[in-house]
Amino acid sequence: MTSSRTSARPGRARDPARTRGSLLAAGVRLFAERGYHGVSVDEIVGQARCNKRMLYHYFGDKEGLYVEVLRAVYARLEASEMSPLPARGTTEQKIRKLIARHFDYLVHNPDFVKLLLWENLNEGRLLAKHPGLLSKAPVIERLQSILEHGRERGELVWSGDVRHLLVLMMGMCFIYCSNRYTLRQAVGLDVLRPRVRAEGLRLAQDAFLAAIGLRSVGSPRCRPR
């Protein structure tokens, strides 16, 4: 006779964190691949190797899981952007580092890029139900602080709405990942090549610095190959 203990799925009932994590990981993969409306609860629990009851227990429903998926991927980006910057660094060094962190996160997290594209295709309807979920307030405050410090040190004179600068930064970085498969055909750049991405990052940094009145000095150049 098989006991109730041995008939249960190994480790699932005894490891809530693992079960929740498996559901979250399955949600990231599937929502990134097909969007919110293209994924069923059955598919999610199938990939997570648990039952529907667990999804409803931890997340309430499919929308609850989707919200937590977005929260999780944005939290990882924010953790990268908000990591300590060199305390004695110049304004230019700090801005270059901040942009590089954002760029690298997009390059190494294609699921995040796809999730953002899907949410924009859906006109942000689900996000509208959860105000503040994807707020960029922390990095806006960080960027504002960097710029204010730079003005105090006489490194720049720029003043304006820092949110536009953040949009500039995000846009210049995002296209190298969102359009990675079409840019080769459109403009002949293979942005899947590390050297091409590195050149794109340097140009994004230089353009940002020029926008605030700082010029890049001695930045190494390389030709895309």
Image (spheres, helix red, strand yellow):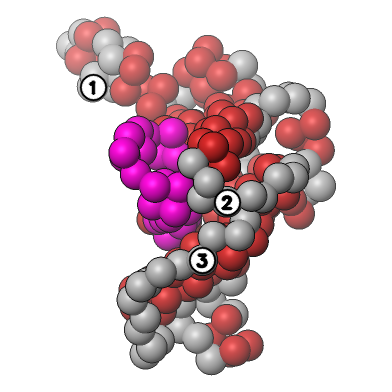
> Magenta residues, as a range?
80-107
Amino acid carrying label 2: it is Leu
Depth order, front residue of 131/80: 80
Amino acid carrying label 3: it is Arg
Depth order, front residue of 223/191: 223
Query: Quick one: label 3 or label 2, which is nearer the N terminus?
Result: 2
Query: Quick one: label 1 or label 3, which is nearer the N terminus?
Result: 1
Q: Are marks 2 and 1 in contact (CB under 8 Å)?
A: no
Is residue 96 within the magenta segment? Answer: yes
Query: Could you classify mark 2 by the number of other residues whose Cα lies within 10 Å: few (under 14), some (14-19), or many (20 or more)?
Result: some
In 3D space, how far apart are the residues under numbered discs 3 and 2 (Cα atoms)? 10 Å
Q: Is residue 225 above or below residue 183?
A: below
Q: Secondary structure at mark 1?
A: loop
The image quarter containing residue 133 is top right
Q: Secondary structure at mark 2?
A: loop
Amino acid carrying label 1: it is Pro
Which secondary structure is most common in the magenta stretch? helix
Instruction: Identify the residue position indicated by label 1 in the image.
Output: 10
Q: Secondary structure at mark 3?
A: loop
x and y percent of residue 220 in the render? 33, 76
Q: Residue at x 35, y 14 (%)?
A: 16
In 3D space, how far apart are the residues under numbered discs 1 and 3 (Cα atoms)? 59 Å
Query: Could you classify mark 3 by the number of other residues whose Cα lies within 10 Å: few (under 14), some (14-19), or many (20 or more)?
Result: some
Instruction: Identify the residue position indicated by label 2 in the image.
Output: 156
Q: Are marks 1 and 3 in contact (CB under 8 Å)?
A: no
Q: Residue at x 44, y 33 (%)?
A: 82
Is residue 165 within the magenta segment? Answer: no
Instruction: Identify the residue position indicated by label 3 in the image.
Output: 215
Q: Is residue 136 above or below residue 19?
A: below
x and y percent of residue 187 in the render? 59, 89
Horizontally, residue 122 falls left or right of residue 212, namely right
